[in-house]
Image: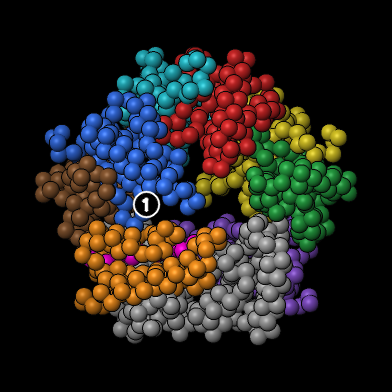
Chain colours: B purple, D orange, E brown, F blue, G cyan, H red, I yellow, J green
């Protein structure tokens, strides 16, 4: 099941620099781990923003919640979600 | 070059039913044609909306404009665009 | 899988009264049919609005899309969707 | 009498960790207590958000105010309320 | 139980003038009837707007819904509702 | 002359607890004083919010400004104002 | 008593051209009449908009309501009002 | 050339009280100075807000920018600007 | 003096096709005429929108108003204006 | 390829004054460097705002992202981007 997710990141300026660096590194490691599992097939950077637009392919909405909640930067993100379905004009389904 | 595009469609209720059917059919044909050219790699339906979220892969912003402007339903669409770039946590670029 | 759905209805004033009555009747019949199938466990009227707030329990996001798209009043609705998951403070999961 | 309530939680980052843990624990205890009283029949987590969507079943608006005001996390919540009534297409009232 | 209600009225310009006059007259009659019943203790015109701000005193949210839904101008109104409760600084409760 | 006023209160979390308690107490005293003068005939708590909706009955807009500016919590309030006038459907003016 | 008023005008395109011309002419006549009475001391056109920003100097909010309601273009206006008072840094009050 | 300017002031609570008092005093002195030069013909306090609505009469947009930028409270202001022109219904131009 | 202007065009669907074509042709002619006068140095199409972003270089705000008001498509445009001034980091002013 | 970019700057008040001065100086140097490369052909100050409106002329969206991300004030900016294309009424393309 596909979900469209936009994450806007705002790390507080007063976060300890070491904690910050560590959190960002952990975020990347976790993101790669989820991608390797096949459940995060697309991630793009939005130009000029500390944001990404992603597609998740999960078993359920619960599954999506767990994945997002597990992201180390989750507490500093504003997340917007839209469930997706196949488009009738998608070339792949003709 | 990648662009994230959301199209919200609102066909006027008083459009002649034949014109409507013909326009929707032409839209689908044009969408498939662009997809076949490789410039519209993803199109998804947003659940519960007469809307799609798409990824375009074009030569330039001008190219994107021409494609969108050529869509038969263009006059009835609200279009939102965000340029995309590679995300540093994308598994494909590690 | 649970989804929170709000539907705001705006039937155009110039819809033929017979068509209107028929569409509203069909909407009710379809709503009852989906409820009987167990996939629409809650529907409430929002006080003072021609709107409902509903909970859907479906197999997938695709399933939800098909249900909503099948509603006779769909063309006259603004629909807002939020995927839900179990709350850790829900008495039922203690 | 039914009310639809959405609570978006934003605990300040500089809250003392012990106070935070204690407040969250008290919140859960209080939420369970109210649920046991039958006045909070539904609580769901919104996917990807530190938020819940709830249904309250109370004697009056005053009653609802007292319940919400008594929540330990109340000072850190943005609360949105809509009064509900029976929907004429609800299967239960046919 | 008190509810704060704002009604913004927008009667369509193409409504038949006789129907319009009749509807406005019926609205006034109904508004007076509800006021006489004690359930609509305050109604004010918002300066420079075709709008009113009102206080309703009803048995329940269902009761409020029925009253609002019964207004002849209901189909042409945008309605905003906030439940009220006693304020601790209200002189009347000292 | 009547004005509809909504006050949303947000006392900063880091305000000294004693200052806070004292300011809240002074606010209540001042609110009662104005009510006793007849210039603040209605004050209600909005359910689930640290907010009030009030009706002021003052000599002039200047008068209203002075009253609001004199409130001890004024620096922590977001205030929304709408001038009111008699509604032609008000039972009292028939 | 001073009020700041913004009027955004949107005359429906399908208004009969003669009615339109007549209404616009009446609006101008009425605006001049009110200005001559001293109650509408300032009116400016907002650049690039079919809008004006005005200052009214009236006896009361009721007075302002009557003036605005009497404008022939009132049904086609969106009106925004803010009560004004003397500014402590106004040169005239030093 | 006339510009309509609204300034909403939000002085940070943690600004040193002496700095605050000094800045507010300097702001007033500067405001009076500009008014004396004839370039700030109107300034009003918005009732219930720490805001003013002003009319500036300047040589150019650059001139306006310099004036606003020179205000001691500029860093704590949200400023909204609309260029104005003569209104055809202004009594002064008949 | 420079102004940043965005024009969003929405020609009503029921405009007579000949009138539409004629109005669009006149708009283009007028736009070219103003550009030739040097007062409209930049005009760009916003990708995917029936909109332009333009820079005007005019004598005064009045001048800008007259130019915009003279555009044949003016009645069908939503116009947003921001006055501009030289940026201190502009290479041209170093 | 042209992009319209608006940057709204909000430097935190508690930034060390030396760091602030240094960052602003570096920002200016970087802005001039990019302008010299021909990729930032226009930059204007928005009157009354700590903001600029700019036109970038870049090879690709990726290129734009790198430029913006390299700005020393980037962490303190809100950035809005719109891709541009040639306007059919541009005098230069007749």
- Residue H60 image position (x, y, % from top left): 68, 24
Q: Quadrant of the N terminus of chain B?
A: bottom right
Asked which secondary structure carries label 1, the reply is: loop
Residue H5 visible in the displayed image: no
Is F9 on the left or on the right of H17, as rendered? left
- Residue I75 image position (x, y, % from top left): 54, 38
Is F53 on the left or on the right of H86, as rendered? left
- Residue E66 image position (x, y, % from top left): 20, 59
The residue segment tinted magenta is D1-10
Residue D3: within the magenta?
A: yes
Residue labelled with disc 1: F50
- Give the image quarter of residue G72: top left
Q: In which quarter of the image is the C terminus of chain B?
A: bottom right
Instruction: Name the residue rendered at 61%, 22% in the picture.
Output: H30
Is H55 on the left or on the right of G41, as rendered? right
Residue G56: within the magenta?
A: no
Residue I15 versus residue I58 in the image, above or below: below
- Give the image quarter of residue H75: top right
């Amino acid at each position: 099941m596909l979900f469209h997710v936009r994450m806007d990141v705002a790390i507080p300026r007063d976060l300890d620099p070491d904690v910050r660096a560590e959190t960002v590194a952990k975020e990347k490691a976790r993101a790669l781990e989820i991608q390797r599992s096949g459940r995060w097939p697309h991630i793009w950077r939005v130009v000029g923003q500390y944001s990404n637009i992603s597609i998740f392919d999960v078993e359920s909405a619960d599954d999506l919640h767990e994945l997002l909640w597990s992201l180390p930067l989750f507490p500093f993100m504003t997340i917007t979600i839209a469930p997706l379905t196949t488009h009738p004009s998608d070339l792949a389904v003709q």
